[in-house]
Image (tube, helix red, strand yellow):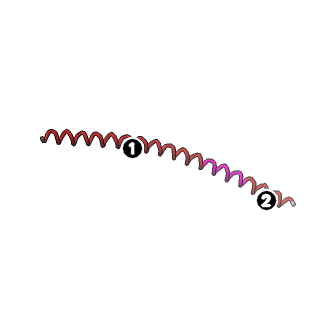
Amino acid sequence: MDLQRLEQWLDDLIGTCERLNEENYVLRKENDLLSTERDELREKGDQARSRVETIVTRLKAMENSV
């Protein structure tokens, strides 16, 4: 009887470990995707900021020349 309980406990433990490994894999992949998305958004923000700064500089130059 004790041996059967131990086997069941080990089976449950193995199942829990397998489930946690699968969840960990999924979470790591999701984290990688979110990191990539964050980097792409940061790059787009930097590009937009640069364009706006260029426009502001040109407007100031036009203002000074008038």
> Which of the two residues, 47 or 20, is positioned nearer the viewer here?
20
Q: Quadrant of the rendered structure where residue 21 is?
A: top left
> What amino acid is at disc 2?
Lys
Q: Residue furthest left?
A: 1
Q: Main secondary structure of the magenta part?
A: helix
Local packing at callout 1 (Cα closer than 10 Å; few below 14, some 14-19, many 20+) is few
Q: Which residue position holds label 2?
A: 60
Rendered residue at 35%/43% (across/down): 20
Mark 1 element type: helix
- Label 2 to label 1: alpha-carbon separation: 55 Å
Q: Quadrant of the rendered structure where residue 15 is?
A: top left
Residue 13 is one of the magenta-drawn residues: no
Rendered residue at 83%/60% (across/down): 64
Q: How many marks?
A: 2
Q: Give the quarter of the figure containing the N terminus.
A: top left
Q: Earlier in the sequence, mark 2 or mark 1?
A: 1
Q: Give the quarter of the figure containing the C terminus.
A: bottom right
At which x and y percent is residue 35? 52, 46
At which x and y percent is residue 9? 21, 42
Q: Residue furthest right?
A: 66
Q: Which residues are magenta?
A: 42-53
Q: Is residue 16 left or right of residue 2?
A: right
> Which of the two residues, 51 or 17, is positioned nearer the viewer here?
17
> What amino acid is at disc 1?
Glu
Q: Is residue 65 left or right of residue 6?
A: right
Mark 2 element type: helix
Rendered residue at 78%/55% (across/down): 58
Rendered residue at 66%/49% (across/down): 47
At which x and y percent is residue 36? 54, 44
Local packing at callout 2 (Cα closer than 10 Å; few below 14, some 14-19, many 20+) is few
The tag on residue 23 is 1
Q: Nearer the viewer, mark 2 or mark 1?
A: 1
